[in-house]
Image (cartoon, rainbow, N blue to C red):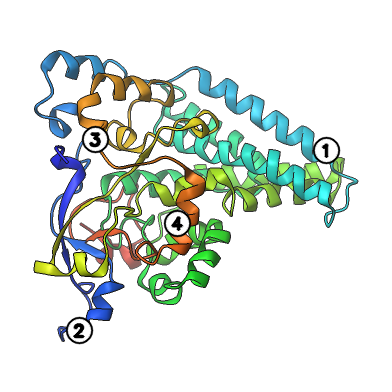
């Protein structure tokens, strides 16, 4: 590939804390891709990411930065839809095909959309005011049922600042996950219950300090949940919780979780071993129709290169800098991404690029963990 920022020469090795003894070939085949180079999206600036892009195009891309007013209206519509469906299903038995079909087809789609609305808002791309963005994220959180928007923001922004950094990027699977889930059954389990992995893993890696925004997020969410149960029924809340679970399970839109940063290039064990070096792209884009439902999160190389550009303008980034994006490896289907993740022996939990150094935490970490995660 022509784009050096998206292609990294990685060194196959045991995790830095592992024993110095030589690993077996089988160990190497099931290890992460370890690299000692910079991450491929170092700054949200085309001058840094694409230094050879003509100055006129650099200016055109940077003009796309800034909030998108449409976002708040989409969020309001989806929240309203979910509240309506929850109320409509208040008397429908939980263990019925109707309840689960509505939760899967409509509820999971809507809540995945809200997950990604919160993702968009975490970059301050709905309003110019940071406070307004925090409050909108709390509102978007309501149909999800569990308060998480306030915590998501610092972890996600750290993911951008510390892509692939072991101990900082909580999007990376842990060594325990890699050990336990390195099989077809394990990968299927991971895909089915990955929402829980993404919820619990950050707390196992490092904790962020709690703020008044976190408290407000919890108070507003629990008050909404209690009000919904009081005015409708427990089933109404169960509908929202089930929608959130299915949104992060075996659902077409959930494919983006895996498709974004897992290495899907065909890298067989024999290809990974020679000279202990392999060029591996770390971010993959998807340009298909499901982007309409997901704030264009499929344009993931573009998003990581320019996180200050909102979802409605990411296609314009691709059009302006087409020569840098069109030849990069991409996914044609999120459904196939899930299928291949489970069944392809060359794709799995360990197919992530990890780096030992670099990056930084956004929002800080609690003192008991600070010394372990500082860059």
- Name above or below for residue 41 compared with residue 275: above
- Which one is nearer the viewer's eye here, 11 or 234? 11
The disc, 2 or 1, on the residue closer to the chain's N-terminal end is 2
Spatial CA distance of label 2 from label 3 is 39 Å
SS at circle 3:
loop
Q: Do the residues labelled 1 and 3 touch (CB within 8 Å)?
A: no
Kindly indicate whether the residue at mark 4 contacts the one at mark 2 (C-beta within 8 angstroms): no
231 or 259: which is nearer to us? 259
Q: Mark 2 points at which residue?
A: 19
Q: Distance between the residues labelled 4 and 1?
A: 38 Å
Query: Quadrant where the N terminus lies?
Result: top left
C-alpha gap between disc 2 and disc 4? 32 Å
Q: Is mark 4 on a helix, strand or loop?
A: helix
- Find out whether the residues at labels 2 and 1 contact each other: C-beta distance under 8 Å: no
Residue at numbered disc 3: 327
Give the percent coordinates (x, y) of residue 246: 64, 51
Q: Residues within 10 Å of mark 3 (few under 14, many from 20)?
A: few
Mark 1 or 3, which is nearer the eye? 3
Image position of 99 (left or right of 107): right
Instruction: Classify mark 2: helix, strand or loop.
Output: loop
The disc at residue 87 is 1
Q: Name the residue under label 4.
A: 340
The answer to which of marks 4 and 1 sits earlier in the sequence is 1
């Amino acid at each position: 590939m022509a784009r050096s920022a998206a292609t990294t020469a990685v060194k196959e090795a045991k995790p830095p804390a592992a024993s110095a003894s030589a690993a077996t070939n089988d160990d190497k085949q099931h290890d992460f891709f370890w690299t000692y180079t910079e991450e491929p999206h170092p700054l949200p600036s085309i001058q840094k990411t694409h230094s050879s892009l003509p100055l006129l195009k650099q200016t055109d891309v940077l003009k796309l930065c800034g909030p998108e007013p449409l976002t708040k209206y989409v969020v309001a519509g989806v929240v309203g839809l979910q509240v309506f469906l929850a109320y409509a299903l208040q008397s429908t038995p939980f263990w019925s095909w109707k309840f689960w079909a509505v939760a899967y087809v409509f509820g999971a789609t809507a809540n995945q959309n809200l997950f990604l609305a919160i993702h968009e808002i975490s970059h301050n791309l709905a309003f110019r005011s940071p406070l307004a963005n925090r409050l909108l994220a709390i509102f978007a959180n309501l149909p999800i049922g569990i308060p998480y928007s306030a915590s998501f923001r610092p972890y996600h922004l750290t993911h951008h600042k510390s892509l692939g950094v072991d101990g900082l990027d909580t999007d990376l699977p842990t060594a325990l996950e890699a050990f336990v889930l390195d099989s077809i059954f394990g990968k299927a389990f991971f895909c089915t219950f990955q929402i829980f992995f993404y919820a619990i893993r950050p707390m196992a890696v490092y904790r962020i300090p709690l703020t008044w925004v976190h408290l407000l997020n919890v108070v507003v969410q629990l008050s909404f949940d209690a009000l919904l149960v009081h005015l409708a029924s427990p089933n109404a809340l169960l509908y929202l919780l089930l929608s959130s679970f299915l949104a992060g399970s075996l659902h077409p839109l959930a494919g983006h979780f895996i498709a974004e940063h897992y290495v899907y290039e065909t890298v067989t064990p024999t290809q990974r071993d020679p000279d202990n070096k392999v060029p591996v792209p770390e971010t993959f884009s998807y340009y298909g129709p499901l982007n309409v439902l997901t704030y264009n999160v499929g344009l993931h190389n573009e998003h990581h290169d320019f996180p200050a550009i909102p979802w409605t303008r990411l296609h314009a980034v691709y059009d302006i800098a087409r020569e840098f994006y069109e030849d990069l490896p991409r996914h044609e289907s999120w459904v196939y991404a899930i299928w291949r993740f489970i069944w392809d022996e060359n794709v799995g939990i360990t197919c992530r690029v990890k780096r030992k150094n670099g990056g930084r935490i956004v929002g800080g970490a609690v003192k008991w963990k600070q010394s372990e995660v500082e860059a």
